[in-house]
């Protein structure tokens, strides 16, 4: 039966009631690889490290005075850096554009964003030890914040797409952009920036120099995959729940050559181009 070219359903094939183009809003969470989290642990082998803070005379004197006043000790050193620093699970959101080649095969372009946080402990040992202790430690928080964007180009396969509930699977290529928002350590209540924003002159108090902007991070790449279920309520609307698995490089200095495994889960609200045009 011929279709009317003016009909709002004219973009559908006779054998395929699903719109060729679909759009989705995505909501879920993201758990990044712990391998790249080590970038933030303040150890000497990292670009953002505690030696940078201790190497500034003004900061070091402030820290020494704080240990004397608050810890009642003037002899201290770093005993242990974090060895298993982890990203906290973060909310992830974004949108997707889909072209349905058929009811079983689709091409997807996903854009998703997450803001990642990390926190762990650097242990300072103080001397002499406190009464009743063989060794005494002062734990200090080291923390970071990072924005992470993922762009995925995938092919999706639907199994039994004629049914309301169907299994779906995706495989494709990932581009990601990591941007370090902060990398700091908190020593006895005072925050110190581990990122060198002052250059060769270093931090000097009472000069009005707030430092310059330093961009750390960049573009990484790898593989993207997903598997889940779809509930199609109508030809124009569906709900999808998927588990995401990424195997990617992330461009953080010193860690950009190795791949890490990242996880996520997303709820997608999928609307056809017809439905969007009628909103």
Image: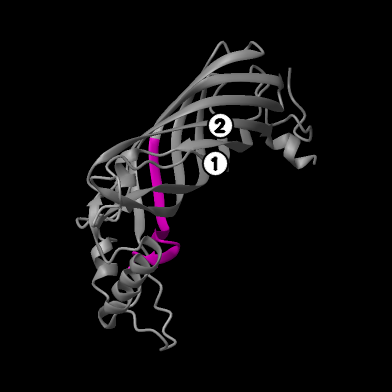
Q: Is residue 260 left or right of residue 164?
A: left
In magenta, the rendered stretch is 173-195
Instruction: State the image quarter where residue 102 is shown.
Output: top right
Residue 223 sits above or below residue 129 on the image:
above
Marker disc for residue 92: 1
Q: Is residue 157 visible?
A: no
Q: How many marks?
A: 2
Residue 207 sits above or below residue 36 on the image:
below
In the structure shown, which secondary structural element does the residue marked by tag 1 occupy? strand
Assess whether mark 2 and mark 1 are in contact (beta carbons under 8 angstroms).
Answer: yes
Q: Is residue 105 left or right of residue 120?
A: right
Q: For marks 1 and 2, give the CA distance.
A: 8 Å
Residue highlighted by disc 2: 266
Is the magenta region chiefly helix, strand or loop?
strand
Residue 181 included in the magenta stretch of the image: yes
In the structure shown, which secondary structural element does the residue marked by tag 2 occupy? strand
Instruction: State the image quarter where residue 160 is shown.
Output: top right
Q: Quadrant of the N terminus?
A: top right
- Along the line of sight, the residue nearer the viewer: 175 or 261: 261
Q: Residue at x 34, y 43 (%)?
A: 85
How far across and how far down the image is residue 184, in percent?
A: 39, 60
Marker disc for residue 233: none
């Amino acid at each position: 039966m011929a279709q009317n070219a003016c009909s709002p359903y004219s973009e559908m094939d006779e054998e395929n009631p699903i719109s060729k183009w679909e759009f989705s809003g995505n909501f879920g969470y993201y758990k990044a690889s712990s391998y790249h989290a080590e970038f933030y642990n303040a150890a000497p082998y990292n670009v953002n490290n505690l030696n940078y803070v201790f190497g500034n005379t003004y900061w070091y004197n402030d820290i020494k005075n704080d240990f004397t006043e608050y810890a009642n000790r003037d002899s201290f050193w770093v005993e242990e850096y974090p060895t298993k620093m982890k990203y906290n699970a973060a909310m992830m959101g974004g949108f997707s554009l889909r072209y349905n080649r058929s009811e079983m095969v689709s091409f997807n372009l996903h854009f998703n964003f997450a803001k990642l946080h990390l926190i762990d402990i650097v242990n300072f040992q103080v001397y002499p030890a406190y009464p009743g202790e063989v060794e005494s430690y002062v734990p200090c928080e080291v923390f970071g914040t990072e924005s992470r964007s993922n762009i995925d180009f995938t092919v999706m396969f639907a199994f039994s797409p004629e049914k309301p509930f169907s299994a779906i699977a995706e495989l494709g290529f990932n581009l990601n952009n990591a941007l370090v928002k902060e990398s700091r350590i908190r020593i006895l209540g005072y925050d110190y920036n581990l990122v060198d924003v002052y250059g060769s002159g270093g931090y000097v108090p009472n000069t009005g120099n707030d430092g310059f902007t330093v961009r750390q991070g960049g573009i990484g790449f790898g593989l993207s995959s997903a598997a889940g279920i779809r509930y199609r309520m109508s030809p124009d609307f569906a709900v999808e729940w998927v588990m995401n698995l990424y195997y990617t490089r992330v461009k953080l200095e010193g860690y950009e050559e190795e791949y890490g495994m990242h996880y996520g889960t997303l709820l997608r609200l999928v609307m056809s181009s017809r439905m969007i045009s009628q909103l």
